[in-house]
Amino acid sequence: MRWLGVNQRLEVGAYTIEAPLTYVTTTTRAELDASCINLRLPVGRPVQQAKGALGYWPQYSRISPDQRANYLAWMASGRNAPLADIGYAFLFFYGMERRALVEGQDIPAILAETTRLLSLYPESASFRGYLGSFVAYVLARAGVERLTESDFERILLGVPGILSDSALSVALAWLQHRNQPLPLVLAMEIARRDVRSPRSVVTERLPDQFRALFAAKYAARYGDGVKLKAAANPMRLEYHPASPSLLTMGSYRSSLAPAVLPNVVGLQSQFQPLVSIWSECIEELKPLSRQTAKGVAPHTREAYRALPAALKEGTDHPDKARWDSLVADNVGEDGRVLLPASAVAPLVDVSERPKLTLRQSVDLADTAQEVGFLIVPDPHITGRAYAWDDLICLFRPAGAAALPANGSYRAAASILELGMAMAAADGQVEDAEIAHVARFLEGHFTLTEDEQRYLAAYQAILQHRPPSLARLSRRLQGALTAEQRALVGRFLVGVAATNGVVERQEAAALRVAYNALRLDTAELDALLAELRSEPAAPAPAETSIALNTALLEQILAETEEVSRLLGQAGEEVEELETGTQPPLDTPLVVTHPSGEQPMPARPQAPDPIADKPVVLPLPGVPSQAILALDARYHALLADLLSHEVWDKEEFSTLVRRYGMMPAAALEEINTWSDEHLGDFLIEDGDAYGIRRELLENEP
């Protein structure tokens, strides 16, 4: 039996094999090696056979002549041709295994050919496992300190499928010996194999996204990578031969003594952070995985929204170009983009309708933020849906697109609303009034650059569409004490008087605001009279009021306290909207907004968890339609249908008695009615109107 190496040629019948890297013989007297090509044995013709026909642990001398033809044809192809049976590659590998481990010869050439075969035929897990373990054992037996960095990267990092458990142990030992950080590919491989790492379809369904997210998290926590430690006791790496000849011939076993190397895998605790990253990636990618399973295309708004934050940073939103184009076409001379909601809604696939749902409005604001803009006003802050003709403002923030999050902005916005509503009470908003409100905001609030721009955008909207002073005052009525409401009333008087007079329209608006705040209008008359330095009397409707400058300055000075109160009021309203509910045993007594008759009271509210009331049928509501509405809302809907108009506060009180949030109930019922009755059942305005005609029109 003799070895033919890289610079030799072998001819067997019709086949010529360059660089055969195998054993050959012409004798039949002994079984020398499973891979040895006996030149005296007959060779047939290549045949197509079923997978596995070669059998386990094939030997050249025992396979059929036609199978020898298959093997020699593959060898003559340079061992590059596709293989129907991986057993032929194993048969060839047996000879290299013996040459390297028993005779210790031609190791560089054998390592090069082994890694080449791994790259060509990675499909077989058994083939990858045996060849990976062989490479690891050869490197370990030579000593990890002798492995160069280029060979480490070329062999252990550059060959697909080479990382058997043994090869991974050798790679970690080399890194620890060189005090080099753990590269990403090995960090992921360690986490993947760790028994503590969860298994999930996410890693198979989203391999590219999973790797990118793992890479981002790994780099964020460890920079170039983790530095490894080794256990006190070294690792003894044993080798299990692939060749049947080496397994059965005991004389070879003495050549396969265990290799010794640093035991990095012996300290499993150092890999727990990698397991944590693995788990986090699975959890954060589950939303995208679910979208993918539903057939959502990868480059859509839905898929982008499901991406983890770390992956969004380097990915453009699929709708970004459309938003950029809309902004470029509509920017005004002042640099702002003021548009009706109807111009922006189609960007999130909302067709024309009188009013968007709250969910659609939130989707619009979320998408704007994802493409890099802030939208003013934002339903996350206001809690209100957009009407089709509502005016909105788009602007690009200086930093990352984020909503104002502190109480200072909320208080400043409340003062801005009140100030602009009061300024518009006489039919026009004067520059002096705007300047006064702006100076006050600048002097009393510390806002970020983006918060200032957000407030300025809101001011631009309010100048075009001033808010209702009565509505704003009514909103504050339930959040402030009588003393605090009185202070707000004086603030409004100060805004009205900024230009030195109180016009008759402003005086009338102040009376409306005082009524909405549930303040005594006699106090307003007294204050206006004091400003004129006259006895208390109702302000004449046909005249303006010239002002006492000293008293005006005193009133304006009080606005600092007003800002604090409005900030607190905003926080209290926010807390109420996020879960604070009146006790269930509180009697519910509501009065019809017109004052004509008391509304029926519900003496005992249902338990929102235990009772879950179901009311079927409901008067005027088609049975098929009511079945489409969540049963939790049936009893609430029955109460709402009892009156045509509901005051906002009374509506909120009623809804909370059922253990629900007002905004959520409003959206749920309106979404249902829009789909099944043709439009919103609850009309939002100064009060909530119940559109009974939708029921009367139903067959």
Image: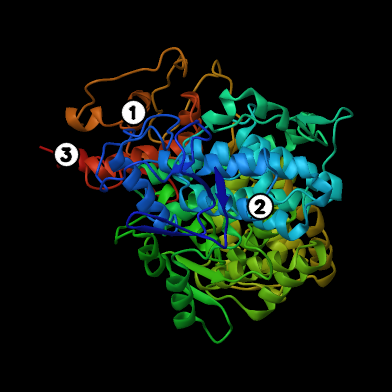
Does 270 sit above or below residue 248?
A: below
Does 138 sit above or below residue 389?
A: above
Left or right of residue 587: residue 347: left
- Between 85 and 336, the one nearer to me in the picture: 85
Quadrant for the C terminus in the image:
top left
Kindly identify the amino acid type of the residue bearing the numbered disc 2. Answer: Asp
> Mark 2 or mark 3: which comes first in sequence?
2
Q: Disc 2 marks which residue?
A: 106
Q: Where does the image place residue 273, in percent across and percent down from the top left? A: 74, 37
Tag of residue 606:
none
Residue 352 seen anywhere in this rendered image of the structure: yes
Neighbor class of circle 2 (other Cα within 10 Å; few <14, some 14-19, many 20+) is: some
Kindly state the secondary structure of the residue where label 2 is placed: loop
Tag of residue 630:
1
Residue 479 seen anywhere in this rendered image of the structure: no
- Between 390 and 274, the one nearer to me in the picture: 274
Kindly state the secondary structure of the residue where label 3 is placed: helix
CA distance separating discs 2 and 3: 93 Å
